[in-house]
Image (spheres, rainbow, N blue to C red):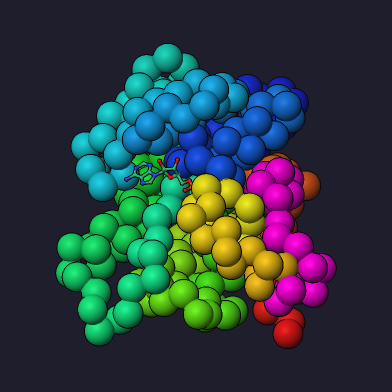
């Protein structure tokens, strides 16, 4: 359980400088959380603090955790929003280095962040972790853009979320996942020519907004979602229903 009024609420958001991550930081700050954006780059004025962190480097994740607990011993919950995508590469042409980078950020980076922050939460009696996966993990395969490793990495994040939930739930650490559909952020900015198609393929007729993702993350972190464990919340405007 986390977020009680009596306890200071702290949360780290990986990818906190990105399109969705920044909105998550802003929404959580408004809701009273002390928020830290963990990212390779500072971005434009993240709400809350910024901690430089490269998820491809385990020592960098450990250093970020150490820095946050050096200033305050209260528990730090975690949102993993950092992610990268291979931009439309045919599976038969995928370079092993690119495979490793996408899996390295989207899966290994999520695992290492959960492990490093989870250890501290377990030692302090609990907290919450929200992993930002994607509808591309278990619900759809993106088309026509080819991104088989991205899709696979997100399916792995959902499996990891359930596994950690079973291991850590009884010890007070609730782990859940949120799977957005198409959201209007820089991750998709390079593909603006696709926006019309994505809007049309979505039952609601539009892409999602980063602040809508942030609201769902806030709910999953908060004690109002206290009976959610290992859940994957799908928010895709009905894209996967068609
Ligand atoms: N935008 C969408 O349509 C969409 C849909 C479904 C899921 N998602 C997921 O939501 C999350 C956020 O996406 P976004 O649209 O905000 O993307 P974004 O590209 O705007 O932001 C991603 C952030 O991750 C950071 N990052 C990348 N590699 C890193 C590394 N090695 N170490 C630390 N930080 C690193 C980047 O610097 C960036 O700030 C991602 O996990 C993405 O897969 C996005």
Number of numbered tags placed on the structure image: 0
- Residue 79 appears anywhere in the view: no
Query: Which residue is at the far top?
Result: 71
Q: Residue at x 34, y 35 (%)?
A: 40
Reply above or below: 199 against 215: below
Picture coordinates of residue 83, whole percent (x, y): 43, 53
Q: Is residue 147 above or below residue 60?
A: below
Q: Nearer the viewer, residue 231 or 22?
A: 22
The residue at the point 50 percent across, 68 percent down is 158
Q: Nearer the viewer, residue 195 or 101?
A: 195
In the image, the segment drawn in magenta is: 200-217
* Residue 177 spot, x, y in % from top left: 57, 60
Q: Position of residue 120 (x, y in %)?
A: 41, 37
Residue in view at x 32 percent, y 61 percent: 102
Which quarter of the rendering shows the C terminus?
A: bottom right
Q: Residue furthest front?
A: 193
């Amino acid at each position: 359980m986390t977020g009680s009024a009596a306890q200071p609420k702290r949360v780290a958001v990986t990818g906190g400088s990105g399109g969705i991550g920044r909105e998550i930081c802003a929404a959580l700050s408004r809701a009273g959380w002390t928020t830290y954006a963990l990212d390779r780059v500072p971005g434009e004025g993240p709400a809350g603090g910024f901690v430089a962190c490269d998820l491809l480097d385990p020592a960098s994740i450990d250093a970020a955790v150490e820095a946050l607990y050096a200033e305050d011993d209260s528990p730090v919950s975690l949102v993993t929003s950092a992610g990268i995508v291979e931009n439309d590469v045919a599976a038969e042409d995928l370079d092993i280095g690119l495979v490793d980078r996408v899996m390295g950020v989207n899966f290994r980076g999520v695992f290492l962040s959960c492990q490093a922050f989870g250890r501290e939460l377990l030692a302090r009696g609990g907290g919450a972790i929200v992993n930002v996966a994607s509808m591309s993990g278990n619900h759809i395969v993106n088309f026509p853009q080819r991104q088989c490793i991205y899709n696979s990495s997100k399916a792995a994040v959902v499996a990891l979320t359930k596994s950690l939930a079973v291991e850590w739930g009884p010890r007070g650490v609730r782990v859940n996942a949120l799977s957005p559909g198409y959201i209007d952020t820089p991750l998709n900015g390079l593909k603006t020519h696709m926006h019309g198609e994505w809007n049309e393929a979505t039952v609601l007729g539009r892409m999602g907004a980063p602040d809508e993702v942030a609201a769902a993350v806030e709910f999953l972190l908060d004690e109002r979602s206290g009976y959610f464990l290992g859940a994957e919340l799908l928010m895709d405007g009905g894209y996967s229903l068609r």
